[in-house]
Image: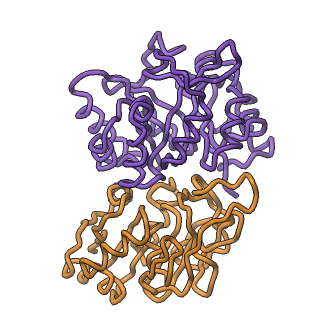
Chain colours: A orange, B purple
Amino acid sequence: MKTVIIQYNAGNIQSVLFALERIGVEAIVTDDEEQILQADKVIFPGVGEASTAMQYLKQRKLDQLIIQLKQPVLGICLGMQLMCKFSEENNTQCLGIFDEQVAKFKPVEEQLKIPQIGWNNIYDLQSNLFKGIENNAYCYFVHGYFATKGKHTIASTDYGIAYSSALHKDNFYGVQFHPEKSALVGEQILKNFIEL
Amino acid sequence: MLTKRIIPCLDIKEGRTVKGVNFEQIRDAGDPVELATIYANEGADELVFLDITATNERRKTLSELVNKIAHHINIPFTVGGGISSIEDVQFLLKNGADKISINTSAFKNPILIDQLAMEFGTQCVVLAIDTKQESDGNWYVYLNGGRVKTNTLCIDWAKEAVGRGAGEILLTSMNNDGTKKGFALDITHQLSTQLSVPVIASGGAGTMQDFADVFNTAKADAALAASIFHFKEIAVPSLKQFLLNKGIPIRI
């Protein structure tokens, strides 16, 4: 079993690596095309800003590489958003794997802080990625933009609006929350991904 | 529903946990990694580590500790204390910290907030403010661990910092810190309701009701405490159950 974390200018690579270590999975961090193509599982992390990240991926042709991957791929946070079609964050054309769009949270009521930071529920869980996870389990989120709900939604969360906290299409999976920081629930989701 | 966060804070000196009463009189409260793991397993929502070491070996000792913590705990954590440059932050994030907190260095050089937000994203920039209510009734910003008074109002500095890219505010009331008489509800309420980013209330927690008050009355997004957790006066699981029973959104 070979697990690869795609190396690019994302902030949470180290945390993902440590979380995998805790569940007994050795992963390598690389942007090498061959290594990524040969991996059994690919994790596409992400913390940061959409247009800068897309630009970085394009310069290294990682954008073309990611969309042609056939093994299970897990996008985390910005990683998941970049797998969508389009992000309102600096009007960025993204990878287009998921049809869902990425929009900015709007403070519908006074008390809604943006970005959303903290633990929120995930519900309507519809994938093996959530095997053993209870409906309404808590995960840790940090984000100012969200993926709308659509046909690829496999988990939802409410923050002013109901949005996609996870997406799935073919071999591609994405989670908006940070499984690497979501205590035992997060570790179970990472285990489930590795066992897909 | 987004929950209110309970955040144990560990003050670190030369790799060990300490807690001062009114910023002085330090007592040893144990091994930080061991304590952090216990808190994470007990259901703490996040952890904050504030380093008060003042030696030349500081960066090395701290980054080793951060690396060890990051390997062991599965919840987010913030590291603060003596951070004054992009390089300091890079070092800590590279070793696995999720967020960093800055205080005096940001006040003296506010552009640091812009730079850190640009380089690493606002989500990892926590601005810590030590504030004290003076006899004129106003809350002022204090620097250098509460030793130096400024003439800047807490609310003004908080607003400026958020404008520059601070993603969260960690607000410590010096009037309340170490007293166990409850959080400073008025200044916490002011910041929580006037800022667009989350506010972490700190200083003064003594009873479980104090936490209920800071969430319900002062509208804090998170509450931080140190000694009551370290010395086992309040356990995280019973605190969270208490708050949940009061109808406050809490992760159990």
Residue A168 is left or right of residue A153, and the answer is left
Q: Residue at x 21, y 80 (%)?
A: A33
Position of residue B232 measured from the top left corner of the image (x, y, whole percent)? 58, 24
Q: How many marks?
A: 0
Q: Residue at x 57, y 53 (%)?
A: A117
Q: Which quadrant would the C terminus of chain A be assigned to in this image?
A: bottom left
Foreground residue, B43 or B90?
A: B90
In the rendered image, the residue lying farthest to the right is B246
In the figure, A69 relative to B178: above or below?
A: below
Q: Residue at x 46, y 23 (%)?
A: B143
Residue B152 is left or right of residue A37, and the answer is right
Q: Residue at x 64, y 22 (%)?
A: B204
Foreground residue, B251 or A65?
A: A65
Foreground residue, B68 or B113?
A: B113
In the figure, B50 relative to A117: above or below?
A: above
Q: Which quadrant would the N terminus of chain A be assigned to in this image?
A: bottom left
Q: Is residue B160 visible?
A: yes
In the figure, B8 relative to A68: above or below?
A: above
In the rendered image, the residue lying farthest to the top is B25
Q: Is residue B67 visible?
A: no
Position of residue A178 measured from the top left corner of the image (x, y, whole percent)? 48, 61
